[in-house]
Image (tube, rainbow, N blue to C red):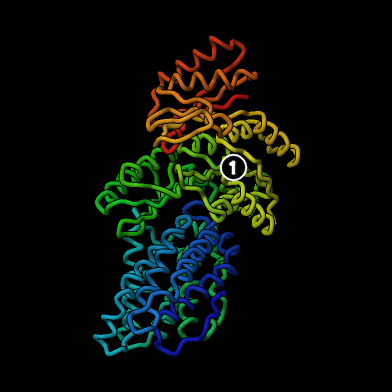
Amino acid sequence: MPHEPQPQAPDELDAEAVRTWSSLALAALGRAREDIDAINVYPVADADTGTNLYLTAESADRGLAEAFPGVTDGTGATSLSEAVRAWAHGALVGARGNSGTILAQLLRGVADVLGAEQADRAEHGGRGTGGLLARALTRAAEEAYAAVAHPVEGTMLTVAGAAARAGEAAGAAAGTAVDVARAAYDGARAALAETPGQLAALGRAGVVDAGGCGLVVVFGALWQALSGQEPAAEPVRGRAVPVPQPPDPCAQEEDGPAYEVIYLLEASEAAVGELRERLDGLGDSLVVVGGDGLWNVHVHVDDPGAAVEAGVVAGRPYRIRITHFGDERRRARGERAQRAVVAVVPGEGLAGLCAEAGATTVLVRPGELPATAELLDAVRRAHAREVVLLPGGAELRAAAAAAAEQARAEGVRVAVIPTRSAVQGLAALAVHDPEGSFDEDVVAMTAAAGATRYGELAVAERQSFTSAGICQAGDVLGLIDGDVAVIGSGLTETAEAVLDRMLGSGGELVTLVLGPDVPDAVAERLEAYVQHGHLAVDTVTYRGGRYSAPLLIGVE
């Protein structure tokens, strides 16, 4: 059942207060989402700050709901410590964009202090939660500033810092938790109003900072959760604060990196320190949040493969999302593209290839399938009235259908093309015509995918029975249309046998996608093999990159 927020008694800072704060913040961000998106001009004018904050808050609320009220403090009462940590963890694993990543770190800072609530209450005899909350807000602002590689004033960091200082002043004056929350809310609103004068991009546009606007919403929800009173006005609701500026004929729109890369990373703190330095040299808007072995990495770069590779060096990256900003200025004007493609791909090289073709990509690791929510998020990030979804595997068909159904309920026209391999997705993307009618485009892409036979080479991990006989651990398996057709001892020889079978029924184009450890010599030999036996067949080769299979083959 959805949680029904209940007013709190003054100074009652407990697990129920956190739960109520989360619910109220999620609801308020949902109401303000479109307004905040509309004023998003910094650091990239891609009109998604409100959406990113909402999705992050949604993930945080889900994490809290899953943990509540299962953990107790030993007396039967729900633990504030466990509740706030579950909330922060939910935000960390589901953080979206620059603003959502910073929000996740703010909640982690709150959790660092409130997580020690038992010791604090023992020291103060169960009282003094105003001071506890003030310390939590201060820690949150400190950790958020530390997480951003190059902090900029006039952003949500400024708003967080002002809220913390106001809360500290109220706490120092022996204020209750309600007093601290109200002071933080008022301090955040005052700081937000000053942001256009601190950041030139905001001043030129005549708007307040979008991320800061969302943070004011969160602080308003905190005060409401503790006091039971609604803010006098919906916290800013994303409305712009007019800042008259004379026209500047020399002003030009700033160019920046083409891609946003986000991933979760399992790594040590020392490895993350080296990762920060490496990513800082690759791009901008770098934010790395988290701790205790789990991190959320966000950066804007021109080379998404290098950003992911840096994560591989540092530890184990997963839930990788690569977004091409492309026409962010169009999005900033509130305009949606007429049509977009979302492609699920198993390899960072393929993700970059599809992104360069204009697709929004979902990068997956072997054995880790994206859930419906992740596919729906990609459809939303595509920011189009019409979306063609290429799931890239039969096992994703149900999740893709569910994501499409939810997107349709939000007013997006979505078609799912039943691609069963990345090479079928490439074939469909090659004939994509964004200028034609939606139905004709879907028919053409479906036909191209359906006309592409697909093969894959994999290495057997153990002895097992297959449709081609018994294989041993280490054997090379040649799959055609999902079934094992060839069992061999070498990659090249097995690939040649697979090509013979696939080209036996004809074909005009062979697509080879090489895995990260496959040398170029293998591609050269296979290209020569095809040319020698099938003079009329062309061959094209791509690098699948990290996480791709040893070899993917497509025959059209």
Disc 1, SS: helix
In this rendering, position of residue 359 left or right of residue 140: right
Residue shown at 44%/36% (left/top)?
464
The residue lying toward the viewer, choosing from 128 and 168, is: 128
The residue lying toward the viewer, choosing from 466 and 228, is: 466
On the question of residue 543 being in view, the answer is no
In this rendering, position of residue 131 left or right of residue 233: left
Residue shown at 56%/10% (left/top)?
533
On the question of residue 264 being in view, the answer is yes
Measured as percent of width and height from the top left, residue 458 is found at 45, 32
User: Residue flagged by tag 1: what amino acid is it?
Assistant: Ala
Q: Quadrant of residue 81?
A: bottom left
Q: Is residue 82 above or below residue 244?
A: below
The N terminus - image quarter = bottom right
Residue shown at 56%/63% (left/top)?
36
Q: Is residue 336 above or below residue 530?
A: below
Q: Is residue 74 above or below residue 39?
A: below
Question: Disc 1 designates what residue?
Answer: 394
Measured as percent of width and height from the top left, residue 534 is found at 58, 12
Q: Is residue 428 above or below residue 364?
A: above
The residue lying toward the viewer, choosing from 545 and 170, is: 545
Dot 1, crowdedness within 10 Å: few (<14), some or many (≥20)? few
Measured as percent of width and height from the top left, residue 80 is found at 37, 78
The C terminus - image quarter = top right
In this rendering, position of residue 377 left or right of residue 163: right
